Amino acid sequence: MLTLAFRDDHAVVHLMSDSEQISLLVGDDTVLSGAEVEVPIMDDLGMFTGDFVLDVDRAWGLVHDFIQT
């Protein structure tokens, strides 16, 4: 399962290959590595460092490309 969490101009992409393993897509330097961004995850807010934050337009494009293949 692939998920996209976003808030304003920031997004985080998760890949869940099974119920016990979640991978995060590497960020695109939209946010500095040490900075933190909150994005909604289900009914809560998740905190992510800039290492895993992408520009929302870039994230949507990557998800689009993923579902096309």
Image (spheres, grey):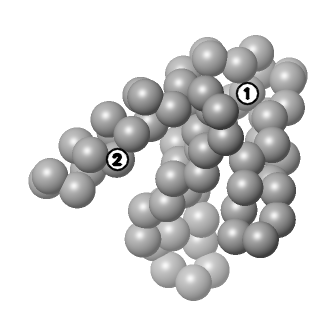
**Residue occupying image coordinates x 51% and y 32%:** 56
- List the single residue furthest toward the front: 8
Q: Residue at x 32, y 35 (%)?
A: 61
15 vs 45, left or right, is left
User: What kind of element bears circle 1?
Assistant: helix
| Residue 32 at x, y percent in the picture | 76, 15
Residue 63's disc number: 2
- Circle 2: element type: helix
Find disc 1 in the rendering and name its residue.
50
Residue 63 as seen in the image, left or right of residue 65: right
Residue 13 position (above or below residue 35)? below
Q: 42 or 69, which is in the foreground?
A: 42
- Residue in front for this viewpoint, 32 or 4: 4
Q: Position of residue 60 (x, y in %)?
A: 39, 39
Q: Earlier in the sequence, mark 1 or mark 2?
A: 1
Q: Amino acid at mark 1?
A: Gly
Q: Quadrant of the N terminus?
A: bottom left
Residue appearing at x 59%, y 72% in the figure: 21
Q: Specify the amino acid type for callout 2.
A: Val
- The residues tagged by marks 1 and 2 sit, at their Cα atoms, a distance apart of 19 Å
Q: Is residue 33 left or right of residue 13?
A: right
Kindly identify the residue that appears in the image at 22 percent across and 43 percent down: 65
Q: Quadrant of residue 6?
A: top right
